[in-house]
Amino acid sequence: MNKRMLLVAAGIICLIVLLSQCITQPAQDLRGPAYAGAGTCISCHQDIYHHYLQTTHFKTTGKEILGTFPASFTYDDGTTVAMAVTDSGKVQGGHLFHLSVGSGRHAQTYLYWNNENYYQLPVSYYVSAGHWANSPGFPTSHPKFDRQIPSTCFGCHSSAVGIKQVTMLGRGLNETFEKGKMIYGIDCERCHGPAAEHVAYHTAHPGEKKPMYMTAVRSLSNQQQLDMCAMCHSGLKTPQKALFGYKPGDAYGDYFFPDIGGPSRPEQLDIHGTQYQLFTASRCFKSSRQMSCVTCHDPHENEGNNTVAFSKKCMQCHQQQPSPGCKFDKMAVLNCVDCHMPKLPSSKIVLSGTYYLRTHLIGIYKQ
């Protein structure tokens, strides 16, 4: 009897230990043990974290679906694609909206899941225009539901995606994904690097103020900081290796072939963002050896269209009042941006009306 009770007691102890491990051990980050997950940043960086939740970077993928329902879009051939709400959820042309891509400041496009792959839906919602229209790069002549989305797209629209298998198909690669395995948006560790060691050290040494096991962005050279932003803001290209592997300090050239004759004219706008090429072609940039994206942008804040805040950034370098040639000298300190970085028609998106994007080629434009 004693032996039996001993075995029962041992079994109970093993069960308790096993269950305690299940409770106390957090789920490993999809990216591996070197990553801690953005939620671990809250305890020390609470204000920055909660402000960042409102930014376009954080919202670049998710489940929220903007736009009106029911709605429809009619193609040139007379085919109509309807957006409707059913018992299963929101549907476009027979396919469920599984994922939204885009922060919603300008637009959202949508993906559906089928046979271990993501496909882009042909109709997107344009917030600034206030209606549905063909997705960027999709024809206006007819709907197509067969645009497969590769992991390279998720490299700039998410922090990680679960890739199940990669095989060769002809001369190209064929990928399959794990359903539901994704870290939405651009989280802290996409720009600051893997943080598991950093979190472990500062949890054990709460009085230590010097950030350990973490690369401070301000310690990077100006070009390294520019390269960080250029990874996703230099237009639609095929990277030579996965952007998910980026670490602070990596060179743009390690991931993409160098640009030759990149956009330098204001009309060369790209919905995927040629901001880097246009910005570096600007006289402001060329006249300054230390100007970078963060000179004007705070990546931790939802700046939106705060023209006053951006104009104050302009006045840090242009300390004198606007030149005598400025017709709007009384309002210039409130809005430099609309004159010197105007919204211009995009040739990449074809709508029933003109779709405008703000150029990053800073200059003097004819009024």
Image (cartoon, rainbow, N blue to C red):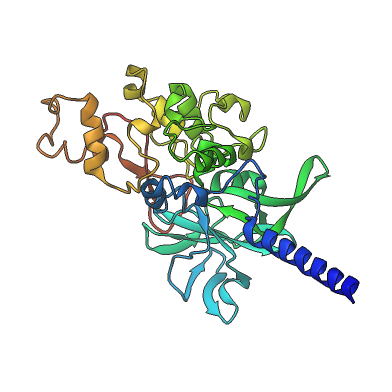
Outermost residue toward the front in this view: 2
Q: Residue at position x 51%, y 24% from top?
A: 261
Q: Is residue 332 left or right of residue 121?
A: left
Q: Residue at position x 41%, y 25% from top?
A: 280
In terms of image quadrants, where is residue 178? bottom right
Outermost residue toward the bottom in this view: 87
Front in this rendered view, residue 257 or 41: 41
Relative image position of residue 264 (x, y in whole percent) = 43, 28
Relative image position of residue 72 (x, y in whole percent) = 49, 71
Where the N terminus falls, by quadrant? bottom right
Any part of residue 257 in sight: no
Q: Is residue 362 left or right of residue 23?
A: left
Relative image position of residue 73 (x, y in whole percent) = 50, 68
Front in this rendered view, residue 143 or 113: 113
Number of on-image labels: 0
In terms of image quadrants, where is residue 79? bottom right
Front in this rendered view, residue 200 or 121: 200
Q: Is residue 191 left or right of residue 322?
A: right
Relative image position of residue 327 (x, y in whole percent) = 12, 34
Any part of residue 337 in sight: yes
Q: Residue at position x 17%, y 25% from top?
A: 319
Where the C terminus falls, by quadrant? top left
Does 140 appear above or below 236?
Answer: below
